[in-house]
Every structure is written in structure tokens, then in C-alpha cells.
């Protein structure tokens, strides 16, 4: 079984509103799996999550731009995965999902927990303290490194208006057991 690291859900409303401060050093909620008498654990227990926001020309408008998120920027506090050069080996994955928000009965904006877009990055090893750019929306394998035959596809637009973002869900899959042995 493949170890999964579920990272905390982080509100991004502060970014959407353009005011305030979002503490992006997030303590992780980790889901470990039991195998036999032991557990599969990952060493990472914190991540820093940021967003790359660019200006994009609004379709049909001349000289009118909008801000959009095009990448999740993820930095883990510990290495995840190992280099595996055997043919058809599994890769480690980082998946970033951005959920939306909606108005509650009192008229306040609250997270809806509905995924608006997601992105994925695949490679053998994710090093500690290195910022990884996870592209949003479906991408070619050359962009995100994910083999479409061995990984689940992602959906959603390749850019997202920051004002629509509610929460972020980050999922990390390692290609190894906690003893460093590659997954079958």
C-alpha cells in the first residue's frame, strides 16, 4: 500500500481579499497506514504552501487584466520518496486541490469544500526545504512529470481567480515505505 500524507487544509481567504496575513507554515494532518504489525509513516509533518499569482489578459478586453492563481508552491520540511531507477517504478506525487467558497445563511463567505481545480506534480523524490511548483489543471506529462497510465488525472481550469478560493488541500504520496524500501 502506498503511504499518503494528507496535509492540512489552509484558508486562502486572506489572499482573495488582499488584506490580512495567511500563516502558510502548516502543521500537517497525517494519515498513516498499518501493514502487518507496523505502520507506514512519512517524515514530513509541516509544509509551506504559497500560490503563484499572475496577471492574465481578460478575453475580449483590450488592456484589461485579472489576477489568477496558476501554481501551488509547496515546500516540505522533510524528504519524501527515494530515487528509484528500476523500470516502471512508482513515483512520489504532490497534489494540490483548491476548493471554493459560498455564502452561509448569515451572508458570510465560508469554504464550500467543493474542489474547483487541482494540480499534480510527480517525481521520485521531493527534497526538504525546496519549493516545488505544482501546475493547476490538466497538463501534459512533460509539464508535471505524471504518467497518465499510472496516476489519477486532475481536473479544473489551469488558472483560478483568487477571490473564488476557499481552502487548499494538499496530498503527498511517497514511492517508498518508511524503511526506504520502494513500493512494489
Image: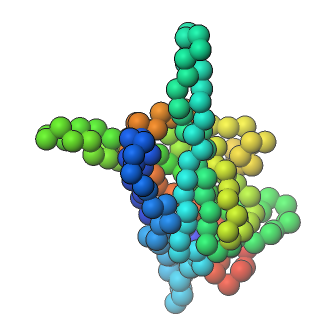
Q: Position of residue 181 (x, y in %)?
A: 72, 79
Viewer-closest of 33 and 100:
100
Task: Give the number of callouts.
Answer: 0
**Which colour style is shown?**
rainbow
| Residue drawn at the location 50% of the way across and 80% of the way down | 34
Q: Position of residue 114 (x, y in %)?
A: 37, 43
Q: Residue at x 74, y 49 (%)?
A: 145
The residue under the point 71% across, 46% down is: 144
Image x and y of residue 179, in percent:
68, 84
For the C terminus, the quadrant is bottom right
Residue at the farthest left position: 106
Outermost residue on the bottom side: it is 37
Residue 155 visible in the picture: no
Considering the image in quadrants, where does the N terminus appear?
bottom right
Q: Which residue is outermost to the front?
A: 19
Q: Quadrant of residue 60?
A: top right
Task: Work out whether 91 lies above or below 110.
Answer: below
Question: Residue 70: x and y, percent?
Answer: 60, 39
> In terms of image quadrants, where is residue 22?
bottom left
Q: Is residue 60 visible?
A: yes
Viewer-side residue, 177 vs 120 = 120
Q: Tell which of 59 and 134 is nearer to you.
A: 59
Identified at 45% across, 52% down, the residue is: 168
- Establish if 58 lies above or below 152: above
Amino acid at each position: 500500500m502506498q503511504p499518503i500524507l494528507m496535509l492540512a487544509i489552509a484558508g486562502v481567504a486572506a489572499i482573495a481579499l488582499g488584506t490580512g496575513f495567511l500563516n502558510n507554515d502548516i502543521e500537517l494532518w497525517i494519515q498513516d497506514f498499518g501493514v502487518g504489525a507496523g505502520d507506514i509513516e512519512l517524515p514530513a509533518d509541516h509544509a509551506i504552501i504559497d500560490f503563484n499569482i499572475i496577471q492574465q489578459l481578460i478575453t475580449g478586453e483590450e488592456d484589461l487584466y485579472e489576477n489568477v492563481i496558476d501554481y501551488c508552491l509547496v515546500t516540505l520540511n522533510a524528504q519524501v520518496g527515494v530515487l528509484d531507477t528500476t523500470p516502471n517504478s512508482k513515483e512520489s506525487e504532490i497534489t494540490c486541490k483548491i476548493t471554493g467558497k459560498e455564502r452561509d445563511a448569515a451572508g458570510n463567505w465560508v469554504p464550500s469544500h467543493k474542489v474547483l481545480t487541482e494540480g499534480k506534480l510527480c517525481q521520485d523524490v521531493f527534497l526538504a526545504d525546496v519549493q516545488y511548483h505544482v501546475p493547476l489543471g490538466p497538463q501534459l506529462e512533460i509539464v508535471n512529470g505524471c504518467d497518465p497510465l499510472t496516476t489519477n488525472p486532475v481536473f479544473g481550469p489551469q488558472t483560478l481567480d483568487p477571490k473564488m478560493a476557499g481552502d487548499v488541500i494538499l496530498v503527498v504520496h511517497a514511492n517508498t515505505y518508511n524503511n526506504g524500501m520502494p513500493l512494489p
